[in-house]
Image (cartoon, helix red, strand yellow):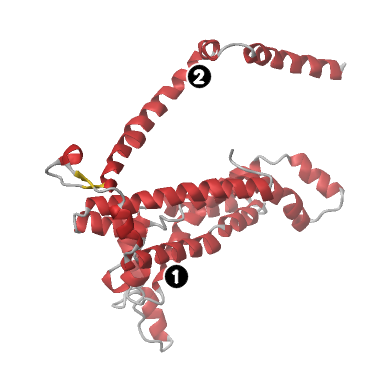
């Protein structure tokens, strides 16, 4: 009887879908017009703020003049891309970008996963929620404030860290002027600000895991570590893959806003990334065409990384975005 009811429910659910399967796209839109209407604001937003500005990419193939505009500027083909490839300064910037992104990927990508698993094991809900609120609060603070905060904490003149080091007889360390430390500082400040937010995403993924799986694991004699290994981690796998692919798409950004706030000319050699380079060349030197070519190069590489990462995950992990 129970089986018959279930079959009936499936049949009732499947019937409209089967009918729609043979209908035209117009009939589907007419049937679900309210759902399609909800898409309109999002589509308009994308068209106005995402796709329309792409028209400006044309200046990457021109010697753009603000007085003659896009329509009057001279076409130069791939001149700026050739300049980009043979530019020693850009190669240094590209190296910095890749290195900083790799450091962030290696040290910061697993951290929210580990933190989410550990927080999931907490049984005192008041303590768990308090920790949860404390770790994700920095996400809502702008990089300008975070930069000012760390500049004060790490300052050579009265900063709390150098004051404590002084108590142990260690001389002041110029964290923001030392090329050997600055990349580590970038990774640390990014971790302090964003690990909590990533943890929330993975905690949400953990809550979607069927509790019966944990119960079955306990009946099979699995301890807390085994449950974490064989139930929690596989349950988070789809979210981990999704976040990894999205992260790959931002590999060449490397935290432009963060670095722009924290760096200075002394550490340009190790901290100047593509985003800050585009900002300096585009606005500082008014070389709009070259900076647009650099930005287009970054976008194309990011797109290629997303497609490649998705294909890799699909082939070797059996999971992907599309």
Query: Is 165 on the left or on the right of 110, as rendered?
Result: left
Query: Which residue is rendered at x = 36% and y = 27% of the image?
Result: 44
- In the picture, the disc for residue 138 is none
Above or below — where is 20 with respect to 212? above
Give the mark nearer the N terminus: 2 vs 1.
Answer: 2
Q: Is residue 133 visible?
A: no
Quadrant where the C terminus is found in the figure: top right
- In the picture, the disc for residue 35 is 2
Do labels 2 and 1 touch, CB within 8 Å? no
Cα–Cα span, label 2 and label 1: 47 Å
Residue 273 image offset from top left, x and y in percent? 36, 62
Q: Secondary structure at mark 2?
A: helix
Q: Secondary structure at mark 1?
A: helix
Quadrant where the N terminus is found in the figure: top right
Residue bearing mark 1: 184
Q: Residues within 10 Å of mark 1 (few under 14, many from 20)?
A: some
Give 79 or 185, whichever is nearer the viewer: 79
Query: Which residue is rendered at x = 39% and y = 71% of the image?
Result: 182
Q: How many marks?
A: 2
């Amino acid at each position: 009887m129970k089986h018959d009811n279930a079959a009936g429910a499936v049949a009732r659910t499947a019937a409209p879908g089967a009918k729609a399967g043979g209908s035209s796209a117009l009939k589907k839109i007419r049937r679900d017009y309210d759902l399609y209407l909800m898409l309109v604001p999002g589509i308009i937003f994308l068209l106005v703020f995402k796709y329309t500005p792409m028209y400006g990419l044309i200046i990457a193939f021109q010697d753009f003049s603000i007085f003659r505009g896009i329509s009057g500027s001279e076409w130069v083909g791939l001149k700026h891309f050739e300049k980009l490839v043979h530019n020693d300064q850009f190669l240094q910037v590209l190296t910095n970008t890749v290195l900083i992104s790799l450091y962030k990927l290696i040290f910061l990508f697993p951290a929210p996963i580990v933190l989410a698993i550990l927080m999931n094991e907490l049984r005192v809900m008041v303590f768990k929620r308090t920790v949860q609120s404390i770790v994700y609060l920095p996400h809502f603070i702008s990089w300008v404030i975070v930069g000012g905060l760390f500049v004060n904490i790490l300052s050579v003149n009265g900063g709390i860290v150098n004051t404590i080091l002084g108590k142990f007889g260690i001389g002041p360390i110029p964290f923001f002027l030392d090329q050997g430390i600055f990349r580590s500082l970038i990774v640390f400040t990014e971790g302090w600000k964003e690990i909590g937010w990533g943890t929330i995403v993975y905690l949400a993924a953990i809550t979607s895991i069927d509790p019966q799986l944990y119960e079955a694991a306990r009946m099979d004699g699995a301890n807390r570590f085994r449950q974490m290994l064989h139930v929690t981690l596989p349950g988070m796998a789809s979210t981990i893959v999704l976040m990894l692919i999205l992260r790959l798409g931002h590999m060449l950004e490397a935290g432009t806003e963060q670095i722009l706030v924290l760096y200075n000319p002394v550490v340009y050699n190790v901290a100047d990334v593509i985003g800050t380079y585009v900002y300096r060349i585009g606005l500082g030197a008014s070389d709009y065409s070259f900076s647009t070519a650099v930005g287009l190069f970054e976008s194309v590489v990011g797109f290629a990384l997303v497609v490649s990462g998705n294909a890799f995950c699909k082939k070797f992990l059996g999971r992907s975005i599309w």
